[in-house]
């Protein structure tokens, strides 16, 4: 693990973790997934890993936010995030993408209020 990856992992451990519980009736490999809000540096790293592809960027952002599975830490640096990502399956990955969107997007009405506040100065 590189020094940067170590710092990111350490930083993730100090941030609040948003824990989501998989429905019990669907036979998921995991019971819970924990995601953190990303720093701007982590977002930029995800952009680089995506190679400029929009679909890949969504995946990379969600993977970067993934901090734990069933309470155990996962990291891009040691490959545990990629392993968990694969084990999630298509539907599980889709749920993680939705969870990432939930924690990273402004609450309902916030974006509209922000944009409506625009003033033009000359």
Image (tube, helix red, strand yellow):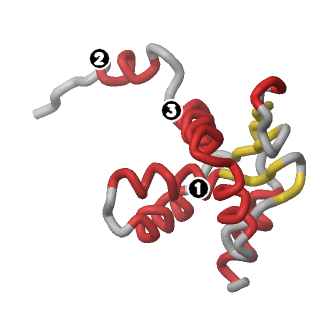
* Residue to which mark 1 is pinned: 39
Q: Earlier in the sequence, mark 1 or mark 2?
A: 1
Q: Closer to the camera: disc 1 or disc 2?
A: 1
Q: Name above or below for residue 105 compared with residue 97.
A: above
Disc nearest the viewer among 1 and 3 = 3
Q: Residue furthest right?
A: 71
Number of marks in the rendered image = 3
| In the foreground, 31 or 36 | 31
In the figure, 100 relative to 121: above or below?
Answer: below
Disc 2 packing (10 Å; few <14; some 14–19; many ≥20): few
Q: Earlier in the sequence, mark 3 or mark 2?
A: 3
For label 3, the residue is 105
Quadrant placement of the C terminus: top left
For image coordinates 36% across by 17% down, the residue present is 112
**Left or right, 120 with reference to 97:** left
Question: In the figure, is residue 43 to the left or right of 34?
Answer: left
Q: What is the x, y in percent for residue 66?
A: 68, 52
Instruction: Name the residue nearer the viewer: 118 or 80.
Output: 80
In the image, which disc is placed on residue 116?
A: 2
Numbered disc 2: secondary structure = helix
Find the distance from the CA under tag 1 to the CA under tag 3: 14 Å
Q: Quadrant of residue 85?
A: bottom right
Q: Residue 42 at what x, y percent from top left?
A: 56, 62
What secondary structure is marked by label 1?
loop
Q: Is residue 70 left or right of residue 80?
A: right
Query: Which residue does the image show at 75% across and 37% down from the upper left?
Result: 18
SS category of the residue bearing label 3: loop
Spatial separation of the CA atoms under disc 3 and disc 2: 17 Å
Q: Is residue 114 above or below residue 14?
A: above
* Point 57% across, 45% down: residue: 90
What's the residue at 34%, 53% (across, down)? 54
């Amino acid at each position: 693990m590189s020094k940067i990856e170590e710092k990111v992992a350490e930083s993730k451990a100090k941030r609040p973790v948003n824990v989501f519980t998989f429905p019990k009736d669907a036979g998921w490999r995991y019971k819970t997934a924990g995601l953190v809000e990303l720093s701007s540096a982590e977002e930029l790293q995800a952009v680089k890993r995506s190679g400029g592809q929009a679909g890949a960027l969504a995946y990379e952002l969600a993977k970067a936010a993934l901090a734990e599975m069933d309470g155990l830490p996962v990291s891009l640096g040691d490959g545990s995030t990629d392993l968990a990502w694969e084990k999630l399956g298509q539907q599980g990955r889709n749920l993680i993408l939705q969870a990432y969107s939930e924690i990273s997007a402004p609450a309902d009405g916030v974006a509209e209020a922000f944009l409506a506040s625009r003033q033009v100065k000359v």
